[in-house]
Amino acid sequence: MSEHDKIRELLALAAADALTSTEEKQVAEHVRSCVSCSNELNAWLPIASELHRLPTPQPSSWLVLATLARAETKLTEQAEHDWNRRVMIVVVAFAWLLTIASWTAFHFVSGRFGGLLEPQFSHTQFSNTWISFAAFTALGWLAGGVSAVMLAIRLRGQRRLA
């Protein structure tokens, strides 16, 4: 497609003032040197001015209100989703920190805290400790998961009442 054809496609939009500033400059430069495009632009100008005088249809008030309510609902849902994601990230980070801290507490309570500081340990001692701690950690994560589900159910019930 030649430059002339591209500009020719923009003439109706130029008459309606619907071009970007860059496109307006291109059309203005081309129209100065091209008589046929200048004549076509002049033919479009009265049509565009008459179109501007036509009344613009307005949406009904119930459609505007319904659209605003729907948009507000979507924005609220998105904000809540973002908030829940941030809270979940903080909770997971806290849970991992708590898990690491509880490893030391578990050793201290079980009387094996000194074994953590000793450079030597046996394979059986490590595997028994690891299994015990894994069970302890799994129970903690399970309790956290159950409480998260219970909170979600409660929140859903509160939304239904609202």
Image (cartoon, rainbow, N blue to C red):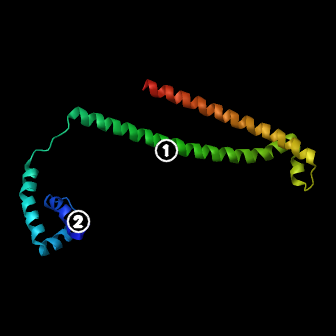
The quadrant the C terminus occupies is top left
Which amino acid lies under the numbered mark 2 shown in the image of this protein?
Lys
Q: Mark 1, mark 2: which one is toward the viewer?
A: 2
Q: Observer-nearest residue: 8 or 123?
A: 8
Which amino acid lies under the numbered mark 1 shown in the image of this protein?
Asp
**Mark closer to the chain start, 1 or 2:** 2
Q: Is residue 97 left or right of residue 11?
A: right
Q: Residues within 10 Å of mark 1 (few under 14, many from 20)?
A: few
The residue sitting at 61% across, 43% down in the picture is 91
Location of residue 140 in the rendering, given as x and y in whole percent from the top left corner: 72, 36
- The quarter holding residue 28 reads bottom left
The residue sitting at 63% across, 44% down in the picture is 92
Q: Residues within 10 Å of mark 2 (few under 14, many from 20)?
A: few
The residue sitting at 13% across, 71% down in the picture is 31
Secondary structure beneath label 1:
helix
Q: Which mark is residue 60?
A: none
Q: Which residue is mark 1?
A: 82
> What's the CA distance linking mark 1 and mark 2?
45 Å
Q: Is residue 74 left or right of residue 24?
A: right
Q: Observer-nearest residue: 95 or 68?
A: 68
Vertical comparison of 30 with 152: above or below: below
Q: Which residue is mark 2?
A: 6
Residue placed farthest to the front in the image?
Answer: 1
